[in-house]
Image (spheres, helix red, strand yellow):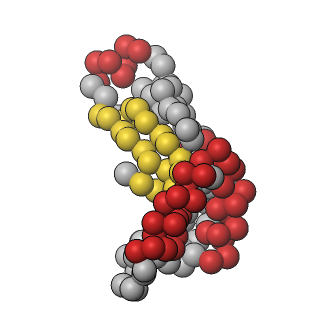
Amino acid sequence: MIEPWITPLSFLLYRYFHHEDCSLKVDLKRPFEAQGKKAFDGNAAIPFKLLKYAVPGPQPLDLIRADSFLGLPYLVTLGFKYARPIPQTLVDFARVCERWLRPIGRFAATRILLVWQKTSSDSASQSGKPSLGCRRRLGR
């Protein structure tokens, strides 16, 4: 899955220019109000906190890949909520900039690709290793 990712630069983007909340104070056990979550309610900090504060030990899912990236082609579209005509040259330019800026991605990434794999109950209970983060790679 591709999710928002919090870096110094993206925090400002999500906090002040995005329609969803971005609060690092979010409680992962109860991230939304008691009334429930509406369709476009969210908090961009949830994936970041989930990985940063993962509890070591057996988990039902094993994180096998985590690659953060800038996501400039997505950013030039201004999101998916409304369809907008975007010149292909602008998207192509964003892709080129994404490659050029890859070295600073760790500090400016706006998205993260997460690949999870279901762990078997036997291997999770026997390994004793933290499942979240034991093989994770952040950035490139």
Residue beneath the point at 48% across and 19% down: 129
Residue beneath the point at 37% across and 19% down: 125
- Give the camera-side residue of 90 and 77: 90
Relative height, residue 27 to residue 41 (above, below): above
Residue beneath the point at 63% across and 52% down: 101
Seen as rendered, the residue at the extreme front is 89
Relative height, residue 99 to residue 97 (above, below): above
Seen as rendered, the residue at the extreme top is 126
- Give the camera-side residue of 49 and 6: 6
User: Which x, y percent locates residue 89?
Assistant: 45, 73
| Residue 29 shows up from this direction | no
| Residue 81 shows up from this direction | yes
Horizontal placement of 102 versus 58: left or right? right
Horizontal placement of 64 versus 5: left or right? left
Horizontal placement of 104 versus 82: left or right? right
User: Which x, y percent locates residue 123?
Assistant: 32, 18
User: Which x, y percent locates residue 68?
Assistant: 53, 47
Residue 16, quarter of the rendered image: bottom right
Relative height, residue 109 to residue 54 (above, below): below
Residue beneath the point at 29% across and 24% down: 121
